[in-house]
Image (cartoon, grey):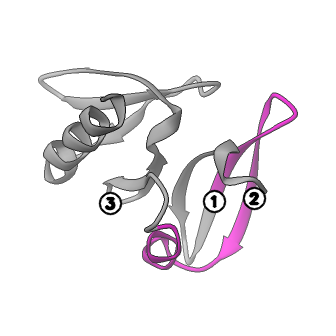
Amino acid sequence: MDLEHLLFLTSKDKSTCIYYLNKGHVDQKVLRGSLKYFEAQLESFPVQRCHLSYLVNLNQVRFIGGHADGLKLYLRNVDDPIPVSNKYRSAISSSLQTLSE
């Protein structure tokens, strides 16, 4: 899988579900390993933790939305928004601002 097609990763039991674009459609692959393991493997790419259960490819973020209930990331080709927990809010906002410069 080409990393430019990576959308996001989420934890699922003791595995990680990887969502990516495949010929214009969102596919998923479940791999054994923790989200923390994949976070370490992808540290040189613009992939960042935004929630206890999510890593997101910052290059795929279309816009940030949300209200008092928290921030949400809206990704290209993904219908459901990705939550951003308060713990990661500042880091995500800063990284997205840096990418847009």
Between residue 16 and residue 45, name the one nearer to us.
45
Callout 1: SS: strand
Q: Considering only order in the chain, which callout, 1 or 3, is on the residue closer to the N terminus? A: 1
Mark 3, other Cα within 10 Å: few <14 / some 14–19 / many ≥20:
some
Marks 1/2 in contact by CB < 8 Å: the verdict is: yes
Considering the image in quadrants, where does the N terminus appear?
Answer: bottom right
Residue at 60% x, 28% y is 78
- Could you give the CA–CA distance between mark 2 and mark 3, rounded to whole angstroms? 19 Å
Residue 50 picture location, percent across and down: 32, 50
Left or right, residue 10 beside residue 66: right
Q: Is residue 75 above or below residue 7?
A: above
Q: Over which residues does the magenta segment extend?
A: 18-42
Q: Is residue 51 above or below residue 61?
A: below
According to the image, label 3 marks what residue?
52
Q: Is residue 27 above or below residue 100?
A: below
Residue 34 colored magenta? yes
Residue 77 picture location, percent across and down: 65, 25
Between residue 64 and residue 4, name the one nearer to us.
4
- Could you give the CA–CA distance between mark 1 and mark 2, rounded to whole angstroms? 6 Å
Q: Considering only order in the chain, which callout, 3 or 2, is on the residue closer to the N terminus? A: 2
Q: Which mark is residue 17?
A: 1
Q: Considering only order in the chain, which callout, 2 or 1, is on the residue closer to the N terminus? A: 1
Q: As shown in the figure, which amino acid type bears the numbered disc 3? A: Leu
Residue at 45% x, 52% y is 46
